[in-house]
Amino acid sequence: MAAESGENKNSFNRYACLCAIIASIISIIFGYDTGVMSGAMIFIKEDLKISDVQVEILAGILNICALVGSLAAGRTSDYIGRRYTIVLASIIFLIGAVLMGYAPNYAILMTGRCTAGVGVGFALMIAPVYSAEISSPSTRGFLTSLPELCISFGILLGYTSNYLFGKLTLRLGWRMMLGVAAVPSLALAFGILKMPESPRWLVLEGRLKEAKKILLLISNSEEEAESRFHDIKIAAGINPDCVEEVVKPPNIHHGQGVWKDLFIRPTPAVRRILIAAIGIHFFEHATGIEAVVLYSPRIFHKAGVTSKNKLLLATVGVGLTKTTFILIATVFLDKVGRRRLLLASTAGLVVSLSGLGFALTMVELNPGERLVWALCLSIIFTYLYVAFFSIGLGPITWVYSSEIFPLRLRAQGASIGVAVNRLMNAIVSMSFISIYKAITIGGAFFMFAGVSLVAWWFFFFLLPETKGKSLEEIEILFTKNTRHENQGLEIQPTTSNNSV
């Protein structure tokens, strides 16, 4: 029986996987918008006759608006639930895509981009949180990394769309690139209604019968469902022996008081969790991924690729590399662990960014010559950089930050991480052209290599391993080397057979 129980505990629940995949479709839409904009900007600049500064603003404004969306999403998901927050994100993004596809001028295009940005902020916060809350410890790394995998797949679709729609007329091509994202947004808004709500959110609302029913669907056995239900009730402040179908939880909040518990009077564990979440989101973009994904055509052009078709084709390679290595990462996250992959990935970023900086510097030092070896090195190190990022830092950022916060703080805690993520994304995307004009494009990537080195030390000292731990156990990892303070947020040690 023990062996059988262990097998059930570690087996793969298909229904939970399906729910996570559907929730992650919103991430495909965001990824598509990111990827397609890299090529669309070439045509938009030519068609609307805009300057480099306007291009930078167009690229980065989505992330400024996503910052606002992500902060609003935490409170919204605590109030209306995880599922309806995904529906809301889809509708907002649908409106933004329609406006961008229609855009007769720069002002309308910016309006659509801003609207889509708010939807992106909602999506980036809610998809990983929903996936984490329906998954078990043995598969949480895989399921929670699905949104990042879907973002990469969306970026690849965007790059491919650039190449295909780029053959249309100048006026029609970029509008088709941007507007076609409205179709999956509409489909997702309806499809998500067939999915179950997060059982953890239902418990917070006191809807115990509904929560248990869903846990039976997403668990591998009734015993596992009971164990998860028991631990979630403890985390929500409900008597674990309560058998009522609907109760009023002692801490019913809809998000009230969470900001105080995070910033004004956090426990030592919560303080460390917040620092870890903000730090990993900061370094995800401070290491330069947005510069490579969004401006890869410019990078390849600087390296010596001059044909527009070849630029877009080389960019497709970036998307293909990103998707492939994130797919590999999803397989190893629950086997190798978050910490090992993260440290190996960040070390690889230091090496590949240094190599890319060197190759591009050689090209710039020889402006009259076509250095084929430097061109090849630039492309190789760009792909290597994307590979190292995608096998570790990219997916782990979202997995880690969505699983470390205690239940009551999870939605709004995750939204703070996403806000920092979008802020850094905006800073990099809106300043990269100005930075490389000031310190050369090679110098810009040497700068990112230095930031990656700092990131490695941060991860090494401040991020413990969370592989195989239940969401209700993880906070205990962050109490190490801190004095225990029980303010209603600390989680009691769970019984054996724990499987949340």
Image (tube, helix red, strand yellow):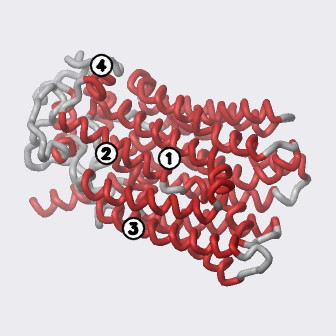
Mark 1 vs mark 2: give the one in front: 2
Name the residue: 91% across, 53% down.
169
Q: Mark 4 points at which residue?
A: 257
Label 3 near label 2: C-beta < 8 Å? no
Secondary structure, mark 1, is helix
Q: Which residue is at the front of the view, 472 or 458? A: 458
Residue that carries the numbered disc 1 in the rendered image = 24
Mark closer to the chain start, 3 or 1: 1
Q: Where is residue 443 in the image (x, y as percent from the top left)?
A: 58, 62
Identified at 46% across, 52% down, the residue is 284
Q: Which numbered mark, 4 or 2, is in the foreground of this view?
A: 2
| Pointer 3 or 4: first along the chain | 4
Q: Which amino acid, mark 2? A: Ala
Q: What residue type is labelled 4?
A: Gly
The secondary structure type at the circle numbered 4 is loop
The residue at which mark 3 appears reads as 347
Q: Earlier in the sequence, mark 4 or mark 1?
A: 1
* Element on which disc 2 rests: helix
